[in-house]
C-alpha cells in the first residue's frame, strides 16, 4: 500500500491518471507545477489521507520533489494564483503550483503542459443488439 517517507506516509506507486483506485486505497493525489517553469510537466504528489500530515511537512515534501531553482517551496497556489493555506483545502485530482520565495507567476500551466486528451477521457461503450 503506502510506505513511510519524509516523516509522513506517502503513496509511492502509480499515478493520478487512475485516481479513482488510489482514492479508494486512501491515497490523495494531485498534480503540481513548478512556478514559472513551462518546460517541465507537473509532478504528482501522492500521500495517505489517513496520515497525520502537518502543512510544514507537506511543504518539505514539495521542496524535495519540485527542486525549484529558487530554493524551498514556501507556499502552494491554485492555478489562479490564490494560496492554499492547508491540506484540507487540497482537491483530489487537482492542479497546483509550487512557489518558492518569489512571486507567483501567472502562466498558462494547464493549457500548455497537460495533454487535452488526458482531461477528457470518455469511455466508449459498444452497444449490443
Image (cartoon, helix red, strand yellow):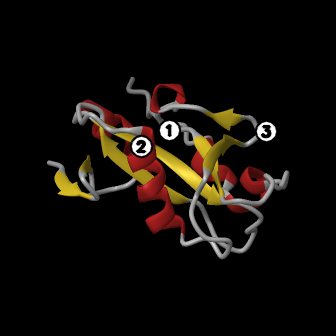
Q: Residue at x 32, y 34 (%)?
A: 23
Q: Position of residue 76 (x, y in %)?
A: 61, 45
Q: Residue at x 29, y 38 (%)?
A: 21
Q: Which image quarter is the C terminus in?
A: top left
Q: Residues within 10 Å of mark 1 (few under 14, many from 20)?
A: some
For mark 3, give the secondary structure.
loop
Residue nearer the viewer, 4 or 16: 4
> Residue 15 vs residue 103: left or right?
left
> Residue 55 vs residue 66: left or right?
left
Residue nearer the viewer, 128 or 125: 125
> Residue 112 vs residue 5: left or right?
right
Examine the rendered structure and indicate whether residue 110 appears above or below residue 66.
above
Q: Position of residue 80 (x, y in %)?
A: 79, 38
> Residue 122 vs residue 103: left or right?
left
Examine the rendered structure and indicate whether residue 71 appears above or below residue 43.
below
Q: What is the distance, in whole Å, between disc 2 and disc 3 at their CAs? A: 19 Å
| Mark toward the start of the polypeptide (1 vs 3) | 3
Q: What is the distance, in whole Å, between disc 1 and disc 3 at their CAs? A: 16 Å
Confirm or deny contact between disc 2 and disc 1 (CB under 8 A).
yes
For mark 2, give the secondary structure.
strand
| Mark toward the start of the polypeptide (2 vs 1) | 2
Q: Residues within 10 Å of mark 3 (few under 14, many from 20)?
A: few
Q: Which residue is mark 3?
A: 80
For mark 1, give the secondary structure.
loop
Q: Which residue is mark 1?
A: 93
Q: What is the distance, in whole Å, between disc 2 and disc 1 at their CAs? A: 6 Å
Q: Which residue is mark 2?
A: 29
Residue nearer the viewer, 47 or 6: 6
Residue nearer the viewer, 117 or 56: 56
Confirm or deny contact between disc 2 and disc 3 (CB under 8 A).
no
Q: Quadrant of residue 114?
A: bottom right
Amino acid at each position: 500500500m503506502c510506505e513511510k517517507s519524509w516523516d509522513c506516509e506517502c503513496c509511492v506507486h502509480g499515478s493520478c491518471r487512475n485516481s479513482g483506485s488510489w482514492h479508494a486505497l486512501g491515497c490523495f493525489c494531485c498534480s503540481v507545477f513548478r512556478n514559472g517553469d513551462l518546460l517541465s510537466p507537473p509532478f504528482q504528489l501522492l500521500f495517505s489521507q489517513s496520515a497525520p500530515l502537518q502543512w510544514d511537512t507537506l511543504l518539505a515534501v514539495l521542496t524535495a520533489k519540485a527542486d525549484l531553482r529558487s530554493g524551498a517551496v514556501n507556499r502552494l497556489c491554485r492555478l489562479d494564483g490564490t494560496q492554499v493555506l492547508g491540506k484540507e483545502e487540497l482537491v483530489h485530482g487537482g492542479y497546483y503550483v509550487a512557489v518558492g520565495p518569489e512571486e507567483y507567476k501567472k502562466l498558462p500551466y494547464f493549457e500548455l503542459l497537460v495533454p487535452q486528451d488526458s482531461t477528457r477521457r470518455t469511455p466508449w461503450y459498444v452497444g449490443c443488439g
